[in-house]
Image (cartoon, rainbow, N blue to C red):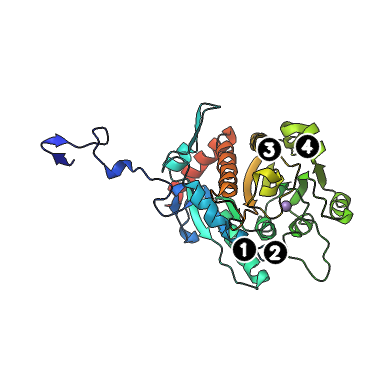
Amino acid sequence: MAKRGGKRITAATGGYSPKHRVDRPFVGIPSFLRSSICTDLDALDAAIAIMGVPFDEGSPFLAGSRMGPRALREHSLRFGSANKGFYDPETDKQYLEYEMANGLIADTGDADILPTNVEKTFEIVTDMTRRILDRGAMPVVLGGDHSITYPVVRAFDTPLHVVHFDAHTDYAPFIHDLRFTNQHPFRHISPMKHVLSLTQVGIRSLREGREYSGDSIRDGNRVITMSQFHRLKPNGIAEIVPANAPCYVSIDVDVMDISLVPGCVSAEPNGMTYSELRDTLKAIAKRADVIGFDFVEVNPQLDVGTGITSYLGVHTVIEFLGHICDQPRWIAKRTRWRQGKKRRR
Ligand SMILES: [Mn+2]
């Protein structure tokens, strides 16, 4: 302990101890929530793996969501300080505290991107996701545009339900050999053998043709428009997935209303409020066994100076993760994970 004039210097007496860092959001290496960085996936020992996919070559209009993972990480530094998670005055609860304090969350960095070589880049994304799953961790994927959901979902080899939040179905027909844009991922995902069901929520764009939602419905998927969403409400959406069933969730930031997301090129009017999305994600976390999720389409290049779209985006990710980890089934999972950790050593 440092002494000045024979007096102990502590944080309480106005001194400084590096043990109790202030860690303002502009200080430090921007890993997700200041979690430890683990880019060697063979050595990954965490229950939750954050993974960035800075890819936006699937964007048909304005590119820039490749900068999304970095911006989302930066804005994550605004939440609490290391090892604390976040506190919600609404529920009077601290979330993610156990996960942060016990090293259950690791930031595995970004998938490598091979510009113009989409298929090889997607192989890299699939391989990275698979390796995270092989290490027993739940992938939390930061995009990137929505094309990246296809190589992520195909990495799972166990059956799962997919719930997709978006203004758009992203179910474009494969014409002119276009297959890998951000308008195509769910046409790939729908027929995958391990995908038990696909539910698309918040669909309202007037820029997709009839064949998008029409083909999705024909293929047996549920397409839920905004008025249907208002009728079903969060619990009604969650109940579409069987209780305790494994579920992958894909969230396009444009499921929220255009007024909330200036940093999203595909923003649409008549979208969800934050609380509508949050309550639906929370209901899904309670109802189903969420085994992975992604958050896509934040374009920091278009965002306003305060970065509110990146902030709203990472707010959604952190709050959803908090509710996933607040479930009894997660607490059982993390106990198994800790027992496995002893064996892995
Ligand atoms: Mn969209």
Picture residue at 61% right of the left edge, 72% below the top? 115
Residue 153 image position (x, y, % from top left): 68, 55
Q: Amino acid at mark 3?
A: Thr
Q: Earlier in the sequence, mark 1 or mark 4?
A: 1
Return the residue at label 3.
Answer: 273
Q: Earlier in the sequence, mark 4 or mark 3?
A: 4
User: What's the mark number on residue 58?
Assistant: 2
| Secondary element type, mark 4 | helix
Return the residue at label 4.
Answer: 229
CB under 8 Å between callouts 4 and 3?
no
Q: CA distance from mark 2 to mark 3?
A: 27 Å
Binning the other alpha carbons within 10 Å of mark 4 as few (below 14), some (14 to 19) or many (20 upward) gives: some
Specify whether residue 134 is in view.
no
The nearer-to-camera label among 2 and 3 is 3
Return the residue at label 1.
Answer: 55
The extreme front residue here reads 305
The answer to which of 278 and 322 lies nearer the viewer is 278
The answer to which of 19 and 153 lies nearer the viewer is 19
Picture residue at 23% right of the left edge, 33% below the top? 13
Q: CA distance from mark 4 to mark 3?
A: 12 Å
Count the marks: how many? 4
Picture residue at 80% right of the left edge, 46% below the top? 204
Q: Amino acid at mark 1?
A: Phe
Residue 213 image position (x, y, % from top left): 85, 51
Q: Amino acid at mark 4?
A: Phe
Q: CA distance from mark 2 to mark 1?
A: 8 Å
